[in-house]
Amino acid sequence: MDTRRFIEYRNRVVGAVSKAIVGKDEVIEKVLICHVCGGHVLLEDVPGTGKTMLLRAFARAIGGSFSRVQFTPDLQPSDLTGINFYSQKETKFRFRPGPLFHDVILADEVNRATPRTQAALLEAMEERQITVDGDTYPLGERFLVMATQNPLESYGTFPLPEAQVDRFFMRLALGYMRREEELSVLARRDTVDIISEIKPVITDEDTAFIRANYRNVRVSDEVAGYLMDLVEATRQGEFSFGVSTRGAIALYKAVQAAAALSGRDYALPEDIRAMAPCVLAHRVAAGAGLRRADAEAKLEHLIDRIPVPVEGAI
């Protein structure tokens, strides 16, 4: 396994995106892990922290096209997938693709759209294809969706059901920058100009190699057992419902990708501890009347309680 190629891949993408998004290398790397694993991101944060700029810069770094869709109650599924329209010039129906046919999609405030429109987005995410009037259109290999939810407002929203939230590979939050970082952003030129200068730093061949080989990362029986200890602990009464098998598979993949991008061909318990909060927290529920933050806090405490395999056993 050529670990140098994984490190170069990570450094190129994170280095390019960090030119526009200051101080968020850890979040950028997690978005890259989602891209490598073929997953999608649910981003929950307050407005104005750089969600759109992050994804726009990421799209340019990987050489993909970008589309931002503002979700509203009157948004229809066909506004996402596209429509067949009659061309008088050609005297036949033609297909006009919707924004989901771009490579990188920002579904902004996804909880403001109706469940029917949300379902159209989630179907494309899961199947990686779109069907319109009986015709099926495959989506590109670089297809990545980042859906955002505004945690401050609930009026006029349609929260995603837990079964649909489970389809997101990770849930992330950008958060505010540190004081020094924010001062540097205030004084520099416009972020849009910086993003416009970002050039693709990887090729489709690079991504194909990474996706084909990151699963070769060795996960010892002890580390895999530690992962399952954590997953099974979420199913034993502390939560209304625990992590699904889909969630366990997602964590396993994320751990392998994180190890590979760190230049290792083996996984460590530290990889599980680093990936578990963002891969699992949105897949558990703390109980009726409790906030989502309560589920995250309970999961953090659970992770701290699970015994970590000792080094000699790995």
Image (cartoon, rainbow, N blue to C red):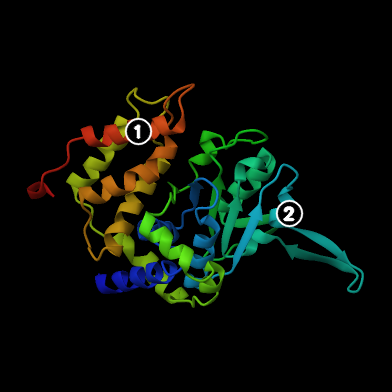
- Would residue 264 be seen by someone viewing this image from the given angle? yes
Q: Which amino acid, mark 1?
A: Ala
Residue at 62% over, 49% down: 121
Q: Which amino acid, mark 2?
A: Asp
Q: Disc 2 and disc 1: Cα gap in Å? A: 38 Å
Classify 10 Å Cα crowding around label 1: few (below 14), some (14-19), many (20 and above): some
**Which residue is at the front of the view, 125 or 278?**
278
Q: According to the image, label 1 marks what residue?
A: 297
* Residue 289, disc: none
**Which residue is at the front of the view, 247 or 105?**
105
Q: Position of residue 96 (x, y in %)?
A: 76, 64
- Would residue 29 be seen by someone viewing this image from the given angle? no
Q: Position of residue 209 (x, y in %)?
A: 38, 71
Q: Quadrant of residue 257?
A: bottom left
Q: Position of residue 307 (x, y in %)?
A: 17, 36
Work out whether 189 lies above or below 237. below
Q: According to the image, label 2 marks what residue?
A: 79
